[in-house]
Amino acid sequence: MPAQPRQKRAVSIALAVLLILAVFIYHGSNTWQAEGPVLSAPAVPEVAGLVPAVYDIDVMLDPHTGTVVGSSRVEYTNNQEVSLPEIYFHLYPNAAVFSQDVKRPGRLEVTAVGTDSGQLLYAMEGTLLKIELASELSPGEQIVLNLNWELTVPDYPGRLGENDGVISLGNWYPVLAVYDAAGWHLDPYYELGDPFYSEVGRYRVKLTLPNNYKVAATGNLTARRRLPEQQKELVWDTSLVRDFAMAVSDDYAALEQQVDKTLVRSVFLRGDKAGGQRVLKTGAEAVEFFNGAFGPYPYDQLTLAATGFYQGGMEYPNIVFLARQFYGLEDADVLDYIAVHETAHQWWYGVVGNNQIEEAWLDEGLTEFSTILFYEQVRGRGQEEARSLISLYQAYQQANGDGKILRPLNEFPGELAYTALVYGKGCLLFLQLREEIGEELLLQVLQTYYRRFAYKNATGEDLIQLTEEVSGRDLNSFFQEWLH
Ligand SMILES: [Zn+2]
């Protein structure tokens, strides 16, 4: 149900007061310290039944050639009940899409793999790295793997790629594949949707790059120092996160604002200051609202960064990529909607994870629903933008007949069907569920879901059971009808 006018006014007055009290700090000058304040290392929560992987990544970026020379030390614990003779990593930059129609093809080449006691046999195939262990890793046992690698960043407007003066580093380093009750998940990089499934881990990333470049990244910036030859070294430490992403430019400026325990930052190209200001305001409002609606965001910082990503926006832990092409005033509503959507993903994908390949509706449907909730309760206007994907679904349904939401990414016939069904129909499912059990109960469901599955991966079945548990209703046929 939409907020009543009086509540809406109270919310707007509260927001106005917050904005007046907020301290805006502008990092627009050409300082080598443009990454914002150095924070202390984050607290790392315990997760029952999971010893998270620990990544220690050391990289040097040459922005002129688009090359990254890196090494990773990865502490991996076998959290499963069976012994593992091999371990897999994804090498997403080797997906064909990063090499087609570009001058500088993307490539992630692993040059050595070993443990502290010697080299290991490994094989690269497509977007996978398979490492043969010298002896099987028993349940509960831990191994430390050392990987050397080299990345070429393509000139491509993607999650990974250089475009519009920004180097986007999304899905850019060797990242562990997930082993769960179904075994290893070794899906390739599908071009549709967000083809990812990941466990949380703890990261320390040390980056060396030229002084005049500025970086937006996952985690807390915990150290920086000048190096000889106009270089600098930056270090980030993270809490438990599913991935580590960065965006780099020599033309970045930043604005920031504290919201509860989180420093919200907007990082944008210097010519886009008005757009950058709007993004900061939206990001701060969204964090404030979702903190109250679903439960507090547990991280110390969240950055909304302008990048050359052509598909609107992309969520990563503690950082979202927003398409720089929408920073003009004429696209203010589109940018606003994307910023809210990607911020909502910090709750649904970031804290509560899921297999985005098998059950894309779970995070996307919930994120779209959260976005509509934000517009209803915070803005009381602008819902046309937020509801555009529902209209898309309705048009799709009229032209093509209805379609199944619940299917893996590679079983959608194309972009239109995926967007209409996963986002549009996925969102309608939650709007209809609200009609069915009421908004108060639905928010109670989502708050419980957020607490219970924090730092874990949930399934659609988990959410269905939880909804039945909290509402005391049998909703099986409701969900079956919507999903199948
Ligand atoms: Zn999304």
Image (cartoon, helix red, strand yellow):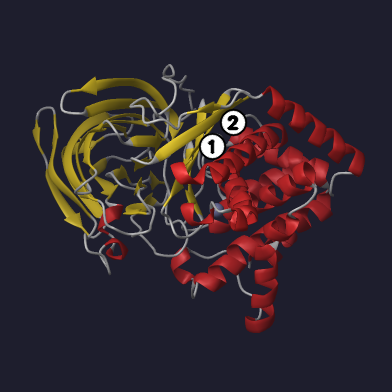
Quadrant for the C terminus in the image: bottom right
Q: Residue at x 69, y 41 (%)?
A: 446
Could you tell whether 146 is left or right of 391 in the image? Answer: left
Which of 7 and 238 lies nearest the eye of the viewer? 7
Image-quadrant location for residue 291: top right
Mark 1 and 2 residues: CB-CB less than 8 Å, in contact? yes
Secondary element under disc 1, as helix, strand or loop, is loop
Say which element carries label 2.
Answer: loop
Query: Which of these two is toward me, 178 or 440?
Result: 440
Is 473 located above or below residue 80 in the figure? below
The answer, for residue 475, to whether it is visible in the render is no
Q: To which residue does mark 1 refer?
A: 351
Q: Which of marks 1 and 2 is nearer the N terminus?
A: 2
Q: Is residue 396 left or right of residue 191?
A: right
Number of labels in the image equals 2
Q: What residue type is labelled 1?
A: Val
Q: Indicate if the residue with disc 1 has its beta carbon within 8 Å of ligand 1.
A: no
Q: Name the residue under label 2.
A: 297
Residue 372: which numbered mark, if any? none
Whole-percent x, y for residue 192 in the image: 44, 65
Q: Is residue 27 left or right of residue 247?
A: right
Marks 1 and 2, Cα distance to the nearest angstrom? 8 Å
Please identify, in this view, whether the residue under mark 1 or under mark 2 is nearer the observer.
2
Where residue 325 appears, as percent x and y from the top left, is 49, 57
Which residue occupies the extreme top position in the image?
40
Q: Is residue 383 above or below residue 191?
A: above
429 relative position to 270: left or right: right
The residue sitting at the left extreme is 118
Q: Residue at x 80, y 42 (%)?
A: 441
The amino acid type, in three-letter code, at marker 2 is: Tyr
Residue at 54%, 68% (x, y): give it: 418
Q: Position of residue 368 (x, y in %)?
A: 64, 53
